[in-house]
Amino acid sequence: MRRSLALTTTVAALFAAALAPAAATAGSWTAPRAATRAGTSFAASVTADLRGRMAVGFTRRLAGRNRAEVRTGRTRDFLRGDSILLQSQRHAVFDVQVALPSDGGRLAAAWLAFSNRAHRVRATTIDARGDFGTPQPLTAEGRESAYQPRFVSGADGSLRLVWSRRTTARGRPVLGSVYGAPFALPAPGVGSSPQVAVDPDGTTVVVWLDAAAGRVLAAQAPAGGTFGAPVVLSGAGRAREPRTVVTAAGGVVAAWLETTGAGNAVLAAQRPRGGAFGPAVQVAEPAQRAFAPRLAATSAGETLLAWVNTNSASGFAGRPGIARLQRLGAGGAPVGRRIRLSPDGARVSEVALAHDGVGSAFAAWSDGARVQARRLAPGGLLGPVRTLSPGPPAHRPAPALAGAAGRAVAAWSERGRIRYSIYR
């Protein structure tokens, strides 16, 4: 009887194992590849989507001309085909940004180009064959330069391009092959560092810096509506470097630095879906002397907040230091232990964070001698540090990083070339 029962139990266990899905195996980073060869290339941006598409945008100096370019490929493979030349001129062209919409539509690209005594935003969309129409001049009027064009992927499926000028901030929706009508953001220009998030209901939340008063402010607008009165998120100290992210539950988390003279603390506040921001919570104490806060949210329900822990008591001059990370709970308060990301001996200036689309995240940085990355599984589980670059990158700032469908793409400038590596 006992032997029969044991045999039955064993057979049942084997049958169940056969029916269970295969356990997901850990991926690895590919050896770095060159996205460019001729000329001098720099300032990469990356994007990836759930369909396995990816793109790298960059600026290239070639034959005395400045060029905005894009290359496309698949995360299961590599970049393929020739570079797509978006603009070439002798005047400045820089800050190329790329984004793939969640509906599988055309790749969006935007960049800055000097024209008529100012830096102008140019933008276009690119089809699967690499074809695109005449780039739209989104800031053709006036003599104010534009700064920091950035795509915002909304939790409602929207894609928007936002940017600042000297005294104003604006945006446009990406509508298939064109960019829609402009809309105003409440932040007063480039010095305010406006950060934009769009929740699943289409509510736009903008968090920005009131530089004169040293405060972080926030305002929100319902889908199709206007922005309400701003609210102050920060406390009595001098604030700077606001950041925002939409959580898996549809809330919005804002984080920033704040100092009263002893060094930068890291603070965070959370706005639940359909609600208002709650009180600020201190995530890292002033002794961290923090710089470069970064936020990411995962589909596992985690919010990740990273910063650089330095030895500088100044609140306004960044320093290299140790990359650290803290998981946040539903109200924005710290959950679990504080995590050290960078290894002993590495001094970094900033960390890049990206969600992999299936619950985990990636962190990447440069210490001036190498580009490194590691995977972060739910619950604060850390993968090993991996070195991606064979040689020193051109700059200490973190590489461009994007993730989707359990994969990630990192890109950086090294010896005048754009290099990239794929986690798969």
Image (cartoon, rainbow, N blue to C red):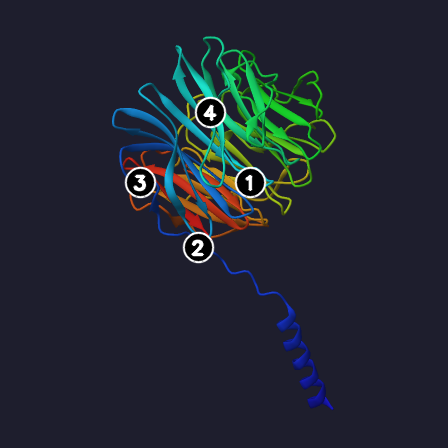
Give the residue furthest to the top: 142
Q: Secondary structure at mark 2?
A: loop
Q: Is residue 264 visible?
A: no
- The residue pinned by badge 3 equals 369
Q: Amino acid under label 2?
A: Ser
Which residue bears the numbered disc 1? 326
Q: Earlier in the sequence, mark 3 or mark 4?
A: 4
Q: Nearer the viewer, residue 78 or 234?
A: 78
Label 3 or label 4, whichever lies nearer to me, is 4
Across and down, in percent, residue 199 comes to 67, 33
Residue toward you, 62 or 259: 62
Q: Residues within 10 Å of mark 1 (few under 14, many from 20)?
A: many
The answer, for residue 74, to whether it is visible in the render is yes
- Residue at disc 3, secondary structure: loop
Q: Which residue is mark 2?
A: 28
User: Which amino acid is tagged 1?
Assistant: Gln
What amino acid is labelled 4 in the image? Pro
| C-alpha separation, residue under disc 1 versus residue under disc 2 | 24 Å
Verify CB contact (< 8 Å) between mark 2 and mark 4. no
